Image (cartoon, rainbow, N blue to C red):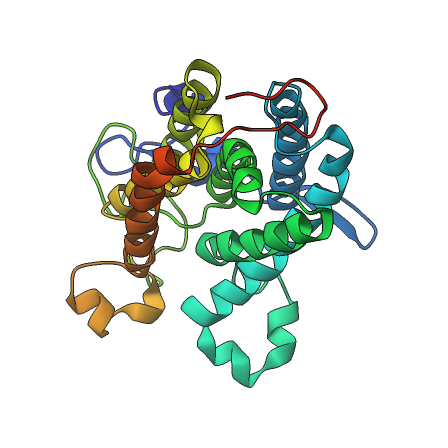
């Protein structure tokens, strides 16, 4: 749906090899506006939008029978989850993609230097949820189920922000919707048109994954089988990311390494345990189904 609109978004675009659109002609910029020393970036707005929209949707889920926590827990949970996303995402990026930063710890605090790792964010968020559940004496696995249903919002906004930033572009391609991004090759070398892999991820990890979890929550009894919803999320994300990585440009720091020699990107290697773990949670979820006593105070659900 998004891809066919790109041409219309840049009616004055100058054709580049094969008539492809130049990213520069789309009029996109990482910054929304600046006032003095303050600059609001699309990437920051994506985080904020993901958290706020996810919070709103979480309250909708908690209003349904059998919720593992009450509405009053939502505020505390958002704090723990947000802290887990930021700390886990940054630490994960350093460990998985830029271990050289450990030699210069101050760079780790510069969030604009490098990036964030989704896989690290997942680990950080999970730790935050477990600590939150222990504090309030809640079922941590069922809390994970509900949080998994809202994560696709953040993924969708985040990948759109990646596109606006002109980063994490795909491999050279000649498809009609390929885009000529800037500064993807050495100076004086013609820029090739590339897959807008950020939009592929926004579609698969955001829209498609949300639709799967929406159906599972609202049209099946999945929420009464602890671990099934989070299993679907982990499995779905792992498969989606593994597929899209075939269209993404490999990380520069791994070129010529064992990882590149295998033909599998770092992102794909990190998805293998996610796929295995997600499949395990989905297949074993029926065995964990027990009588659910909702925190909200409505009648129990078998």
- Tell me the quadrant of the picture where the N terminus can be found: top left
Q: Residue at x 51, y 36 (%)?
A: 145
Q: Residue 240 lies in what quarter of the image?
A: top left
User: Which of 172/78 is in front?
Assistant: 78
Q: How many marks?
A: 0
User: Residue lying furthest right in this view?
Assistant: 36
> Which residue is outermost to the bottom?
103
Q: Residue at x 44, y 39 (%)?
A: 227
In the foreground, 25 or 129: 129
Camera-nearest residue between 1 and 267: 267
Q: Position of residue 181 (x, y in %)?
A: 38, 45
Looking at the image, is 45 positioned above or below residue 123?
A: above
Q: Residue at x 54, y 38 (%)?
A: 142
Q: Quadrant of residue 208?
A: top left
In this rendering, the answer to whether 151 lies above or below 207 is: below
Q: Is residue 198 shown above or below 187?
A: above
Question: In the figure, 30 relative to 14: above or below?
Answer: below
- Residue at (56% x, 28% y) in the render: 292
Residue most extreme to the left = 262
Residue 67 horizontal/vertical position (percent): 61, 27
Q: Where residue 177 appears, x then y in whole percent? A: 29, 29
Q: Residue 201's spot in the image, x, y percent?
A: 38, 38
For this view, does 179 lie left or right of residue 173? Answer: right
In the image, taking residue 62 as reference, residue 228 lies left or right, namely left
121 vs 135, left or right, is: left
Asked if one can make out residue 87 in the rendered structure from this viewpoint, the answer is yes
Task: Evaluate whether residue 97 shows in this view.
Answer: no
Q: Is residue 59 left or right of residue 190?
A: right
């Amino acid at each position: 749906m998004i891809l066919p609109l790109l041409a219309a978004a840049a009616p004055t675009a100058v054709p580049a090899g094969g008539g492809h659109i130049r990213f520069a002609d789309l009029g996109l910029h990482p910054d929304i506006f600046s006032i003095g020393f303050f600059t609001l970036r699309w990437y920051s707005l994506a985080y904020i939008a993901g958290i706020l929209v996810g919070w709103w949707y979480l309250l909708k889920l908690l209003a349904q029978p059998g919720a593992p926590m009450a509405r009053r827990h939502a505020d505390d949970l958002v704090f723990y989850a947000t802290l887990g996303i930021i700390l886990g995402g940054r630490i994960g990026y350093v460990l998985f993609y830029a271990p050289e930063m450990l030699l210069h710890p101050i760079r780790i605090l510069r969030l604009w230097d490098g990036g964030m790792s989704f896989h690290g964010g997942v680990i950080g968020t999970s730790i935050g949820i477990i600590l939150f559940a222990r504090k309030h004496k809640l079922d941590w696995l069922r809390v994970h189920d509900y949080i998994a249903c809202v994560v696709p919002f953040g993924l969708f906004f985040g990948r759109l922000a990646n596109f606006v930033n002109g980063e994490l572009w795909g491999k050279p391609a000649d498809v009609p919707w390929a885009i000529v991004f800037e500064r993807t090759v050495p100076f004086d070398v013609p820029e090739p048109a590339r897959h807008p892999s950020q939009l592929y991820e926004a579609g698969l990890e955001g829209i498609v994954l949300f639709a799967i979890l929406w159906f599972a929550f609202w049209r099946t009894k999945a929420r009464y089988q602890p671990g099934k919803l989070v299993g679907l999320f982990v499995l779905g994300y792992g498969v989606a990311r593994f597929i899209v990585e075939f269209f993404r440009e490999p990380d520069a720091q791994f070129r010529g390494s064992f990882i590149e020699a295998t033909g599998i990107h770092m992102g794909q290697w990190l998805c293998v345990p996610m796929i295995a773990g997600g499949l395990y949670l989905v297949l074993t979820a029926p065995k964990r189904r027990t009588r659910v006593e909702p925190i909200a105070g409505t009648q129990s659900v078998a």
